[in-house]
Image (cartoon, rainbow, N blue to C red):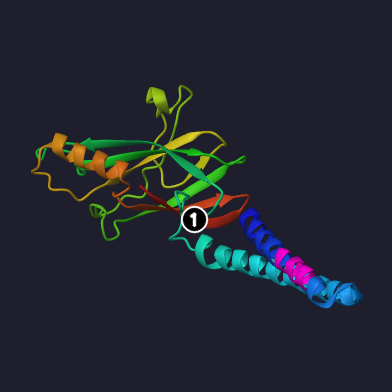
Amino acid sequence: MRKAGGVALFISTCFAGVGGLVALLQYFAVGPKDLTMAFTHNMWLMLATVLVSCSVGMAAYSAYSTFWRGNPRNTHGRQACDDAVKISLLDLVPECFPFDSQLGYKSKVRAVFRNEQSEAMIISGAQWSAGAIGLPAQEPFVPATLQLEGPNGWEANDWPGKESETLRILPGRAFRLWIGLNLDIGIDPGVRDAEIRRRGVAKRLGTLELTLRISGAAEQLAVRI
């Protein structure tokens, strides 16, 4: 808004200056007798220029807001869902295991988030989308992996509660979930860990989709990680 207003003011000032110069030239051309008429004519010209310039500036800002800023592709570092941050990503932890492990999911990534809102939220319905450049999830996908941090906090790796599909998170509290990734389990676990970390830094793992409820209103949240 300030940029559009500044542009409009700059254009208006330029045209007003041109109008004043025209009035001065008319003064020397026609003499003082017709100065009042020339000045009045150019005052209307300058006023019309100011109004048109302001209208152009506001129209440009409106178009920017609608077609650029409002486009979810043009997030400029914001989360795609909304200008207001609902949850923030705190940590990504790869957990990969050898091919002969008894675990069903041998290539996992745990994502830790925090509720950044001023009220409690309910998270559910976790889904995973690899997109064109991400890693697909191992099938069947497990949505019931949500877990709330304990009293010692997530940094102390305190996760005492059971994993669930729905979780209520108070303001400022952290929670985590894990996604089983479809990686070749014949590859060394350390190599798979490194691959997950590199992709996480570049936000090339995939998109986590969650259903979020605040004050009863539900919305879909998409977080690229």
Q: Is residue 63 visible?
A: yes
Query: Relative to 8, is 183 above or below?
Result: above
144 lies left or right of 78 = left
Residue receiving disc 1: 81
71 lies left or right of 136 = right
Label 1 sits on a secondary structure element that is loop
Residue 138, position as x, y percentages in the image? 23, 52
Majority secondary structure in the magenta region: helix
Question: In what quadrant of the picture does the N terminus appear?
Answer: bottom right
Query: Relative to 126, is 37 above or below?
Result: below
User: Between residues 128 and 80, which one lies in front from this camera angle?
Assistant: 80
Q: In the rendered structure, which segment of residues is drawn in magenta?
A: 17-25
State the count of labels: 1
Residue 208, position as x, y percentages in the image? 38, 51
User: Between residues 67 and 36, which one lies in front from this camera angle?
Assistant: 36
Kind of residue sitting beneath label 1 = Cys
User: Between residues 13 and 135, which one lies in front from this camera angle?
Assistant: 13
Q: Pointer 1: residues within 10 angstroms few (<14), some, or many (20+)?
A: some
Is residue 205 shown in magenta?
A: no
Query: Relative to 211, is 35 above or below?
Result: below
User: Between residues 52 and 71, which one lies in front from this camera angle?
Assistant: 52
Residue in the picture at 39% in, 35% down: 162
Query: Relative to 119, is 159 above or below?
Result: above
Residue in the picture at 26% in, 54% down: 134
Q: Is residue 101 visible?
A: no
Residue in the picture at 76% in, 71% down: 25
Q: Quadrant of residue 190?
A: top left
Residue 41, position as x, y percentages in the image? 83, 76
174 lies left or right of 121 = left
Residue in the picture at 27% in, 61% down: 132
Residue 130, position as x, y percentages in the image? 29, 56
